[in-house]
Image (spheres, rainbow, N blue to C red):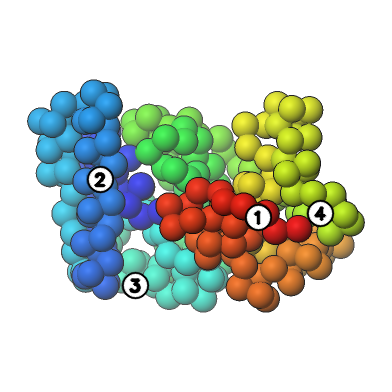
Amino acid sequence: MGAGITQSAAEAGKKVTLVEIDEQRGEQRLQTIKKQLNKKVTKERITQAEADEVFGKVNLEVDLDSIRNVQLVIEAVPEIMDVKKNVFKEIDDKAPKDALMASNTSGLSIASIGAATQRPEQVIGFHYFYPVPIMKLVEVTPSIMTSSKTVKDMMQFALEIGKQPVKCNDYPGFLVNRLLIPMVNEAIFCVMEGAKPEDVDEAMKLGANHRMGPITLADFVGLDVLLATMEGLCEGFSDSKYRPCPLLKKMVEAGNYGVKSGRGFYQYDKNGQKVEPVHN
């Protein structure tokens, strides 16, 4: 989500340093941003001059030494606690002492992440939703150590970049994933018990006014990500109601992750469009 986070801030007029230790991947992130801006130009939502101005606010770096003069660092590395802790230790060493440090985690403990630093009062959760430039919501999650000033500053930052912040408590899944992911997991139980994926999707679209059915959403999010989230909820709350569906586990074991692998509960072409037959 790093490219989307970068684009969102740059579009709000912020100067952004995108740090990617793999330069090739960094260049790919830049191309993603440029492609998204060009789409807006094509649709006449912005002018070419405005797109160029936004892109000009982004600077790619491959070394964390580049954060020595920033006011805010937003981390967007994989959802692995040890990885995040190591990154925050580095950020803590290199960022200015008054800089705020935010994690884009979708549900890991902010207190644990903050404990990896010497300034947990300046560490906070700041969870965006995909696709970042379009989705308005940001979950702002302080830990028990986060200062009220940090919360206030990050709520204000969210508004400055055109997002709507909601304050969450530091428990697994925060708000959206704690509500949404178990619902999707339950939909997969329905499929395991014999319901067709397309019937489950249609039921929730027509009966609950969902824009996207839960099975399609599962494929879109990634079944591996969904499984990891359910396991995190189950472990974090020590509650069996968050147990991952056995079928979900089997799908992940088989390498069927959804759109990104070309096959999940549905099959997809190289452009991520559904093709027949569906996976039953």
Residue that carries the numbered disc 4 in the rendered image: 191
- Mark number displayed over residue 277: 1
Please, is residue 74 above or below residue 11 in the view? below
Q: Residue at x 47, y 66 (%)?
A: 78
Task: Looking at the image, tell me whether mark 2 or mark 4 is earlier in sequence order.
Answer: 2
Please tell me how crowded label 1 is: few (under 14), some (14-19), or many (20+) other residues with Cα within 10 Å: few
Please tell me how crowded label 2 is: few (under 14), some (14-19), or many (20+) other residues with Cα within 10 Å: few
Q: CA distance from mark 4 to mark 3?
A: 44 Å
Residue that carries the numbered disc 3 in the rendered image: 90
Residue that carries the numbered disc 2 in the rendered image: 35
Callout 4 amino acid:
Val
Q: State which mark lies toward you, 1 or 3.
A: 1
Label 3: which secondary element: helix
Disc 2, disc 1: CB below 8 Å? Answer: no
Please tell me how crowded label 3 is: few (under 14), some (14-19), or many (20+) other residues with Cα within 10 Å: some
Q: CA distance from mark 3 to mark 2?
A: 31 Å
Label 2: which secondary element: helix
Task: Looking at the image, tell me whether mark 1 or mark 3 is earlier in sequence order.
Answer: 3
Quarter of the rendering occupied by the C terminus: bottom right
The quadrant in which residue 167 appears is top right
